Amino acid sequence: MASENTKQSESGGAKITVDPPDPPLSAQECISEQPEDPCAIVIMGATGDLTARKLIPALFNLYRNGGLPDPCMVVGCGRTKMSTEDFRDRMTKAIITEDSPDHSKWQVFVTSLHYRPIVYDDLNSFDQLAASLRNLDQKHRTRGNKIFYLALPPSLYKPVAQMLGKAGLSNERQHENGWSRLVVEKPFGRDLESAIDLDRGIHQYFTEHQIFRIDHYLAKETVQNVLMFRFANAIFEPVWNRRYIDHISITATETLGVEHRAGYYEQAGVLRDMFQNHMMQLLALTAMEPPSRFEADYVRDERIKVFRALRPFPIDSVREYLLLGQYEKGTINGEKVPAYRQEPGVNSDSLTPTFARMKIFVDNWRWQGVPFFLTSGKRLAQKITEIAIQFKEVPHSMFRRILGGDITANRLIMGIYPEEKITLTFQTKHPGARVCLRSVTMDFNYHQNSQGPVLDAYEKVLLDCMLGDQMLFWRQDGVELCWSFLTPILSECETCGYRADMLQMYESGSWGPQAAEALNVH
Ligand code: NDP
């Protein structure tokens, strides 16, 4: 008999239950550790999209849920001349609407926002910033703790980090435990050489423990859950290898086009925008060995071993392992959308890929011969992020004589978006007198029996930075290993004679170029 908590799902599958149900956690408990060190968060490029859409909303949410240290001051910097009052008004307009809850909390939070115009190539301007941070420190007792968040165009990461260093802002007050941290957004370079150059530039003034290279995918709750699922259960690890797994598909598709970021995207394309960072991190979490401790460097070491084991890409037969595409006009959610080449800011004969499917292998004992298919693209039929583990068929089907045909192999899907869930597909007997099989699913919804607030990825990133926990951030050796893998592919694709020929056009709203399926063949 089904237990009280086990329900029949609508698709006829059984639903997994959390047993016993979790007691509801309070908002504070869900925030995990609350950072104790007071600090000032200095956002360089605070007039931009990232600040208004992600950073300030994340900080406000942390504040609402009691997750910020007290005090926590935010200083926005930019070339735009603006007063602190103007900045506060601007953030209020961008974030608070009539229907927003917690108006009264915002009124308090907004008083922690400040603004300082800055000239990025003028050391004097940085000296003035340093002086104003000292004043803020004395007034609000932030104990000299500072986070510098580079929400700037990538070309400014290195010069701005160096100006901060020259103005003495990277210095840590060892004797008072005062710290200075630098947060760097993707992209970390555009190839191996530029990534090394960027790193050397930043390292002139900041040491590795001060540098937080963000990959907000890693901070998504369900992405972190991959490690919990794999390493907090005894039953999955024994089958998590070449003996039982046929192939693994990692997918991150979106319905959005290039939006207003054509300037950046034309230079980047899907491989730099998605593969060099997010896709590689999803691959590492899926393929890594269990670390001996759940601590930043132990976990990062294991992720990096996966990058080290990537089989060098067969450049001579690149088209057998990589398919690139670009979207044409089409319809998404009932709305007509233009082709990539007709988007504002895009070259009318652009060869920038907006879709890629790549087949790669991890050359180690566990994964020898198991293909990993990485797929990402814009303007596709649906926004989906998931890791699908396709198991092998049963070695021998004793049912073949009565049932004929093949038995569908097991499949485990770790859904990250839109549904945050884990689904296991397996075979059971169809009810009734006849012997026949049917595929059923067991679904675990990530939020099942949980009532606490979930941390948005940027909230988690900011929180970890305040705590000084680098587990979910890139380490430079990982950045370089991934660029070492990807740079030869990029240079082949961007310089070869068959560049235009390689690009398969696909209709917006479809699932990408039809030829992409061919890459799935072993
Ligand atoms: P924006 O293009 O909005 O630029 C941020 C600010 O930088 C601008 O408001 C502007 O401020 C300043 N700026 C822009 N161009 C120049 C220039 N040529 N020289 C000097 N200053 C300039 O960037 P976003 O806010 O969208 O992104 C910031 C960083 O975060 C980028 O590196 C991006 O790749 C990364 N990122 C962004 C994401 C997003 O969702 N937006 C997601 C993931 C990463 P002012 O003129 O006042 O100085």
Image (cartoon, helix red, strand yellow):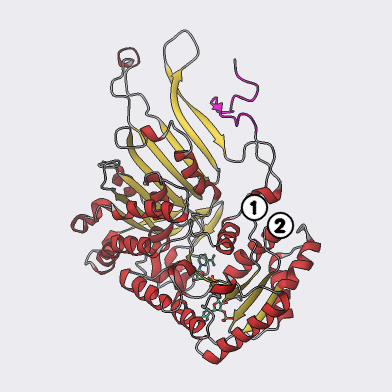
Q: In this rendering, does residue 203 appear at all?
A: yes
Contact between marks 1 and 2 (CB within 8 A): the answer is yes
- Inspect the image, locate mark 1, and give the three-letter code of the amino acid beneath it: Ile
What stretch of residues is rendered in magenta? 2-21
Residue 472 lies in the magenta-colored region: no
Residue 274 placement (x, y as % from top left): 42, 59
Q: Overall secondary structure of the magenta stretch?
A: loop
Q: Left or right: 55 with respect to 506?
A: right
Name the residue nearer the viewer: 323 or 66.
66
Where, by quadrant of the figure, is residue 144 drawn?
A: bottom right
Q: In this rendering, does residue 211 appear at all?
A: no
Q: Secondary structure at mark 2?
A: loop
Q: Left or right: 453 with respect to 499?
A: right
Q: CA distance from mark 1 to mark 2?
A: 8 Å
The N terminus lies in which quarter of the figure? top right
Q: Secondary structure at mark 1?
A: loop
Residue 31's disc is: 1
Which residue is outermost to the front? 175
Residue to which mark 2 is pinned: 66
Mark 1 crowd level (few <14, some 14–19, many ≥20, 10 Å Cα): many
Judge whether 500 appears above or below 202 on screen. above
Q: Is mark 2 within 8 Å of ligand 1?
A: no
Residue 259 placement (x, y as % from top left): 52, 66
Which residue is outermost to the left? 316
Judge whether 106 appears above or below 18 on screen. below
Name the residue nearer the viewer: 92 or 483.
483
- Inspect the image, locate mark 2, and give the three-letter code of the amino acid beneath it: Gly
Identified at 65% across, 22% down, the residue is: 4
